Amino acid sequence: MIKLSINGSEYQLDVAPDTPLLWAIRDHAKLTGTKFGCGSALCGACTVHLDGQPIRSCSTPVSIAEGKNVTTIEGIGETKEGQVIQEVWDDVVQCGYCQSGQIMSAAALLKGNPNPSDTDIDNAMTGNVCRCNTYHRVRKGIHAAAKKLS
Amino acid sequence: MNEIRTINRRDFLKFGLAAGTGLALGFHIPAQASESTATTATANATFSPNAFLYINADNTVTVISKHLEMGQGAYTGLATIVAEELDAAWGQVKVVGAPADHKRYNNLFWGPAQGTGGSTAIANSWMQLRQAGAAARSMLVSAAAEQWKVPAAEITVQDGKVSHGDQSTTFGELIEAANKQAVPAEPKLKDPAQFRLIGKKLPRKDTNGKVNGTAQFTQDVQLPDMLTAVVKHPPLFGATVKSVDDTVARKIAGVEDVITIPSGVAVVAQDFWTAKKARDVLEIEWDDSKAFKLSTDDIFNQFSELLNGKGAVARDDGDAVAELEKAEQVITADYRFPYLAHAAMEPLNCVIHYRGDEAEVWNGEQMHTLDQAMVAGVFGLQPEKVTINMLYAGGSFGRRANTKSDYLVETAHIAKALKKQVPVKLVWTREDDMQAGWYRPANMHRLSATLDEDGMPKAWQHQLVGQSIIKGTPFEPAMIKNGVDHTSVEGANNLPYQIPNLYVDTRSPEFGIPVQWWRSVGSTHTAYSTETFIDELATKAGKDPVEYRLALLKDHPRHAAVLKLAAEKANWGSDVAEGKGRGVAVHESFKSYVAMVADVSVDGNSFKVDKVVIAVDCGVAVNPDIVKAQMEGGMGFGLAMILNSEITLDKGRVVQSNYHDYLVTRMSDMPDVEVHIVPSAEAPTGVGEPATPVIAPAVANALAAATGKRFYNLPVRQV
Ligand code: FES
Ligand code: FES
């Protein structure tokens, strides 16, 4: 049994300690907003926050998250960055599959850097693949959220 | 997720009558409608005038989408058309996905098949949904006229409100009375000048769930007792299972079964990670005696030889061959295009629950009726015994519209072999997805031309070679004519430039690599070769590339208009700094016209695309912001073709496996982009694909302007 705190709720999950956090969240905690894209820390679809820091949950064993606070897309709206990003994100979305990860990365970026430049955005977001290529609007969305937050 | 609705006999008669009017409105609402978010429609107190919408007492208007929402905004666009003619308020409109139904939900451009592709969702539905909305509106108006005892002509409808003088009511309050009205044979459609929703930026209907994690993709389906399956596919195309040792795999707690199926060996377990771990310890011996074992170079060598021989003729104006033979100077170039993977963000997956005498599918469903028939075939059922729940797809770019229903059939084989009849979810890893084939076919083109005294093309010969996507599929009779697969030559055989002698032919060798349509299909390669070659001819003639094209486009005003618009907005002709280059391309695909001007910077061997200005003519822009999003996204998708995407084979083995070696456009590659839409009253045409083929030639032409070099092999990677 592994004890996890996800979005402020406690979960007791019957998973092997080497199970990636992603699959513990998706298949066992049944929170499916966090997405599987590559399984190898190459696409960012599975991004969650561990004690506020963005990590790739597909490549993080669940055991590492024990005793820490996991925040997923289902809970990010409780933070001020997450809430504002969700408010301004309407025009960004296409298929939506990468967007949980985009939003989690963007929220972490804005928390550490309330007024990012395009280069800051490129650096922080280039690990998040979007095959619909919404990048131009992700960039605009982050600027809009930054403005709203300030 | 499902709703079961009962239609009484009277309704059947009425709807049957409606179907007889030739409106193509269908009979009635579906027995099962599914969507990616919960539906609240109830069986009673509903007004359902046709197959495309119903209105509930709570005043919600539910539009039934026969097309898949895979990112291109189909749900929003289709709902906009219905809401427009219905005069509904945008806020009261919801969208659900239609089930598979060859009687009501066929793609009107495809004959008897339901499916989403070829950028046709809006285009084929345009009149159908306008009529559906208008018919409903007219019945609501008649109902109000009856209640208020006033002439129907005096009643107005706006934003979901039905009014006469100071009386007013809602759709929801009228449903009972509306149900008693006759379905109009020919509902009056709006004058486009009266459109209130079409042409406006309306919020998409699918965004909420997609920003808070509640949207349901196939990957997210959770059903009672559901198991998860992963499949070990053969390492070579065409190899089969010889023997399996699953002793270790079966010992892993949570593993339910290991099953040999036609496409490999499936491990079925309680959850994904358990199944994946068990798959990793399977010992499989493969029979590769019939497998495909060539490498990329072998394939291109064969292509090269084939180009020296004859092809099937796709266009022959004048006598290009003779003109080229007697010409003093012939300009010629060979182009190479690699295999490409779709690599949508959601790796392929599918859920099937087989219950013996029927089956239920949950899928990002792109080819309803074909998939339904193929899945039914595995179970030995009639197609209508297979229910399909269409969920959101996390991208597709053509991949989910597989001509053999590959991953659905695979799931069906697993579901059929299960000891217990429980739902099973097939999950492909990224590696499975990337190495399973069904690529954009590799191609080689040879272009040859000669110029007249004024430097204008006198003869143009375009020879192509590449696998046929259509051969051996159910689409063959409709799409292969005289040995020419339309999808191999589109964009080449309809070259818009006025050239007196124009010849196009193609060859379709057969290889064991499965190939498939990839966003914009034939245009992915034909736009590149034609638009870089015409640019090269302009340079040879010493003429401005925009002026040169315009001179050849006199009979093609829509091409010319987008080209002029893009050039004007990009300040074509203004100075370009040292180390920078500006290039242009224009192309029609799926009846939409797109021109792009790309600005690039070159630094040593590397280059970056700084800015792209896009002009598009897609007829009426139903939702201009979605049109823009598709132009931006389609451009970004196509950009990877010139930057870095490539699938290669090493003795039959696919070399690339994940995003570290199959590179795609990322945030840091994405240029600044500007989109301009040509105002138009023409019927709407597609926007999902037409931007994709235009960017690579525009960038290549910009690179040529900056470096003086031409690029014939994709991806270019470095200058
Ligand atoms: S799924 Fe974790 S980075 Fe791609
Ligand atoms: S929105 Fe489709 S992958 Fe990003």
Image (cartoon, coloured by chain):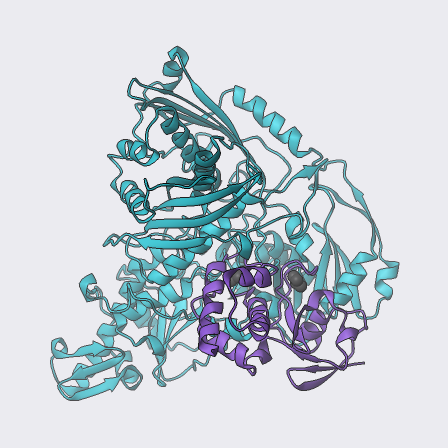
Chain colours: A purple, B cyan
The one of B377 and A50 positioned closer to us in this rendering: A50
On screen, residue B40 versus residue B138, left or right, reads: right
Depicted B269 relative to depicted B572: above or below: below
Q: Is residue B686 left or right of residue A2?
A: left
In x, y percent, where is residue B479? 44, 39
Note whether residue B359 is visible. no
Q: How many marks?
A: 0
- Quadrant of residue B329 within the rendered picture: top left
In which quarter of the view is residue B187 placed? bottom left
The foreground one among A64 and B297 is A64
- Farthest-out residue, front: B578
Residue for point 51% across, 52% down: B397
Ligand 1 - quadrant of the structure image: bottom right
Residue B459, percent from left and from top: 36, 21
Spot occupied by residue B563 in the image (x, y as percentages of width and height) = 31, 42
Front residue of B24 and B563: B563
Report the side of B6 relative to B650 (left or right).
left
Tell me the quarter of the picture where residue A108 sits.
bottom right
x then y, percent, for residue B28: 37, 70
Query: Does residue B215 sit above or below B588 in this rendering?
Result: below
Q: Residue drawn at (64%, 37%), measured in percent from left and top?
A: B512
Whether residue B317 can be seen here: yes
| Residue at (49% x, 75% y) in the render | A86
Residue that protrudes farthest toward the bottom in the picture: B166
State the residue in front, B284 or A100. Answer: A100
**Left or right side of B372 for B154:** left
For the N terminus of chain A, give its image quadrant. Answer: bottom right
